[in-house]
Amino acid sequence: MRTHNLCSSSIVLFILMILLTHAPALAQSAGTLTWNGSRSSSWDYKWNWTPNAIPTANHAVVIPDKATTPSYPVMPSKAYCYSITIQNGGILNAQANAQLTVNGTTNAFLINESGTFNPSNSTVIFTANKDLNGVVTLSGNLGFHHLTISDGSEIQLQSNSNLSISGFLFISLSGNLDATTFQNTITYLGDGQSIPTPNGGSSGYYSLRISGSGAMFPLGVTRCMNLEVGSEGDVIVPAGSGLTVTGSLEVVDGGKLYVR
């Protein structure tokens, strides 16, 4: 019997080792890389970072005040990081069709008060799995062209955050956008944009602003506390869909809101 128990324990231990070896890895930072811009504006040149390394999906990236570096970075066609912070006075430009994949959660993309991200027509993708790693939080005044929330990922906008989108917001089937837990504003700037319904929190927007022309709400119910249609904005609410505004509705002179 003793021999049997020892063998059983060994088998259990062996199975546990296999499970741990093949378990999904938790997203975590491998350390911080700070832009120094000493050689060029190339993101993919290790000497432009301190310490000297090209950012990977596990690096926290910091872009300091442009006055402290000879050049500011340009995001390449494919770039990766765990999180990114653009400090006061910092600038990050994106080349045409650039793509940044962000793997982290807390303050995954943080732009301080006078920091600047010039997105061009780039795409920023958030991938952290909520069940494994927690909710992705975004803070500050954020401007994206295309924004993608991957399967299993949830983005939560923090208090007083302002998010603007000039391209599309794509929420994957099992992705979530929580835009109601904290006071925030989401602005759609582009023309012909589809306004998706966030499916995190209370399934809606806290404050929603439409500044582009030809925007359209989806079929189904969209809720927001506050809705503003800007002077150059026009938005279509398809007949039969449900748009619920529980707070203020403002259509600025020149703006248009159609139900058809």
Image (cartoon, grey):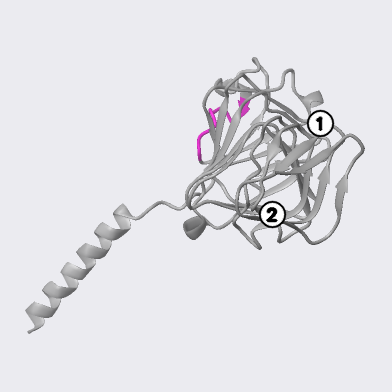
Q: Nearer the viewer, residue 39 or 109?
A: 109
User: Which of the two residues, 39 or 177, is positioned nearer the viewer here?
Assistant: 177
The residue indicated by pointer 2 is 179
x, y percentage for residue 137? Answer: 65, 51
* Magenta-tinted stretch: 49-57
Let me know if residue 53 is in the magenta part. yes
Quadrant showing the N terminus: bottom left
Instruction: State which quadrant residue 74 falls in.
Output: top right
Per the picture, the main secondary structure of the magenta-coloured stretch is loop
Q: Amino acid at mark 2?
A: Ala
Q: Residue 250: x percent and y percent?
A: 87, 48
Q: CA distance from mark 1 to mark 2?
A: 27 Å
> Mark 2, residues whose alpha carbon is within 10 Å: few (<14), some, or many (≥20)?
many
Query: In the image, which disc is placed on residue 89?
Result: 1
Q: Residue at x 66, y 43 (%)?
A: 195
Q: Is residue 47 above or below residue 173?
A: above
* Numbered disc total: 2
Please state, as top left, top right, bottom left or bottom right, where the C terminus lies in the image.
Answer: top right
- Disc 1: CA contacts within 10 A as few (<14), some (14-19) or many (>=20): some
Amino acid type indicated by mark 1: Gly
